[in-house]
Amino acid sequence: MKFILALLLLPTAAVSLVSCVRLLAPLAQGSSFSWNFLCGLAAYPVAHYFWHRPTRLYVLGHELSHAVAGWLSGASVHKISVKKSSGHVVLSRSNAVVALAPYCLPFYSVLCLLLFRLAAFKFDVSPYHPYFLFAMGATLAFHIVTTAEVLLGEEQPDLRQAGGVFFSLVLIVAANSLLIAALFKVLFPQAVDLKMFAIRVLMQTGLVWTWLALRMRSLAAWALRGDGNG
């Protein structure tokens, strides 16, 4: 059942991913603030591959994402263990959302955003806004790079627990695309139009399904002609 659901969601996930990437275009044409974000987005992969891979930091964020998602879904968090290259969290119960949370949620980006907004209630943080945007870009790149590395490496038990690798990957792509688009809107409300993003996703998903329906119709007609000739 989940495999069929993943097949049905696959066009939406693919279109959402492409539409999310396209949101970067207006940022590149925007103010110096958006360039601070883009510089952070570009700087982290360079640091990751040519300087240092913060594995323990990733493991910490991974397990905390499980814990937060579990707590928000009503589960009790009994234990969190974080080691240099592995970790685990013990919850009273779990589900697909909890299992996939670390792969979908840019944990450190959300943490950075919350801390900056909380600080803004008490202090004038405007002088630090460029640094905040650079940090947001870097933490988002951290999430994308480390998540991709993990998913392209050994098979993750979390994916099996959530309902299978294919189902999980489709959900991860869709969730990341939607969450990152929402994050862009929060950071750059004037440059990002979420309404147009949603319309584009719906329209292009419809076009994909229309194309698939036409191809299936043509294939069925060809098969029927073949049977008639036989």
Image: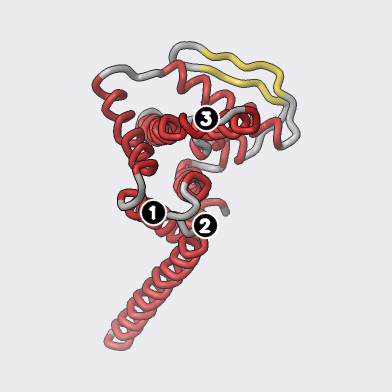
Q: In the drawing, what numbered circle is on residue 112?
A: 3
Question: Which residue position is annotated with label 1?
Answer: 23
Q: Is residue 50 left or right of residue 10?
A: left
Question: Which residue position is annotated with label 2?
Answer: 4
Q: Residues within 10 Å of mark 1 (few under 14, many from 20)?
A: some
**Measured Cα–Cα span from mark 3 to mark 1:** 21 Å
**SS assignment at label 1:** loop
Kind of residue at badge 1:
Leu
Name, please, the residue furthest toward the bottom: 228
Residue 133 is at least partly visible in this image: yes
84 or 119: nearer the eye? 119
Kind of residue at badge 3:
Cys
Q: Residues within 10 Å of mark 2 (few under 14, many from 20)?
A: few
Name, please, the residue furthest toward the top: 83
Q: Residues within 10 Å of mark 3 (few under 14, many from 20)?
A: some
Pinpoint residue 188: horizontal percent, then vertical percent: 46, 48
Q: Which label's residue is closer to the chain start, 3 or 2?
A: 2
Q: In the drawing, what numbered circle is on residue 52?
A: none
Name, please, the residue furthest toward the left: 50
170 or 219: nearer the eye? 170
Position of residue 187 relative to residue 83, above or below, is below
Residue found at x 46% / y 41%: 165
Q: Which label's residue is closer to the chain start, 3 or 1?
A: 1
For the C terminus, the quadrant is bottom left
**SS assignment at label 2:** helix
